[in-house]
Amino acid sequence: MKPLSPTAQKVQDLLNSLGGSYQVIEFAESTHTAQEAADRVGCKLAQIVKSLIFKAVPSNAGILVLASGINRVDEKKVGAYLGETIARADPDFVRSVTGFAIGGVPPVGHSQPMRAFVDEELMKHPTVWAAAGTPNTVFELSPADLVRLTGGTIADVRSN
C-alpha cells in the first residue's frame, strides 16, 4: 500500500490517537465533492459527510456543520441553535480555523475548537464517510463515532 500524503497521514495519526480502527483511504481521483466521494467509495450520497464551515456573526467564531451529502444546510436553523447569525466562510477563514483547505476538511483535527452540529440525517446509516484532510482522502466511521469525536450536537440542519 502506498504511503499517505503528509496531510492525510496527519489525519490518520490523529484518528489513531482518538481510538477506534479508522483507516484513511487516499485516491488518485478527486473526492472533493460529495458525489465524487460517494462514487469512489461505492456508497450512497447520503452517507457522505460534508464538513462545512460557517462564520458566526458577530462573534466571528467558526461553526462546523456536518451535513449529509444529500442535504443543503439551512443557515437560519443553525443560527437559531446558536443564537447568532451564521454566514458561509471564505476559503481563508476556513483554512485559518481548520488548518485545511475547502474540499478536504475533516470533521476533527482543526486549528481552533469549534461548535459542531451533526445532520440528523447521517444517523440513519450504519456508517458514513468523511474527508481526511485533502480533496482525495476519506475515512469511514459510524455516525455515533462522528458525534463522539466532534462533540457535535445532532440537529435538523436541512434546508426544506
Image: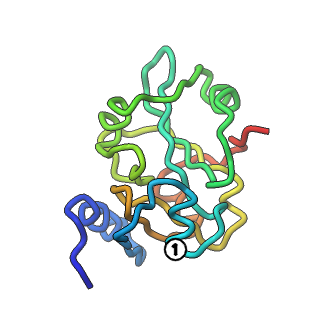
Q: In the rendered picture of this protein, how many numbered marks are placed on residues?
A: 1
At 72% across and 43% down in the image, what residue appears?
156
- Residue 32 location, x and y as percent? 44, 54
At 58% across and 20% down in the image, what residue appears?
84
At 70% across and 52% down in the image, what residue appears?
120
Q: How many other residues sit within 10 Å of disc 1, few (<14), some (14-19) or many (≥20)? A: some
- Looking at the image, is 101 positioned above or below residue 142? above
Q: Secondary structure at mark 1?
A: helix
In the picture as drawn, the residue positioned furthest to the right comes out as 160
- Looking at the image, is 38 positioned above or below residue 113? below
**Which quadrant of the rendered structure holds the C terminus?**
top right
In screen coordinates, is 141 left or right of 61? Answer: right
- Residue 4 location, x and y as percent? 25, 71
In screen coordinates, is 9 left or right of 117? Answer: left
- Residue 92 location, x and y as percent? 32, 30
In the picture as drawn, the residue positioned furthest to the bottom comes out as 1
At 34% across and 42% down in the image, what residue appears?
98
Residue identified by numbered label 1: 41
In the picture as drawn, the residue positioned furthest to the top comes out as 58
**Which quadrant of the rendered structure holds the N terminus?**
bottom left
Q: In this view of the protein, which residue sits in the foreground, 19 or 74?
A: 74
- Residue 78 location, x and y as percent? 64, 32
Asked which colour scheme the image uses, the reply is rainbow
- Looking at the image, is 1 positioned above or below residue 126? below
Name the amino acid type tagged 1: Val
Residue 81 occupies which quadrant of the picture? top right
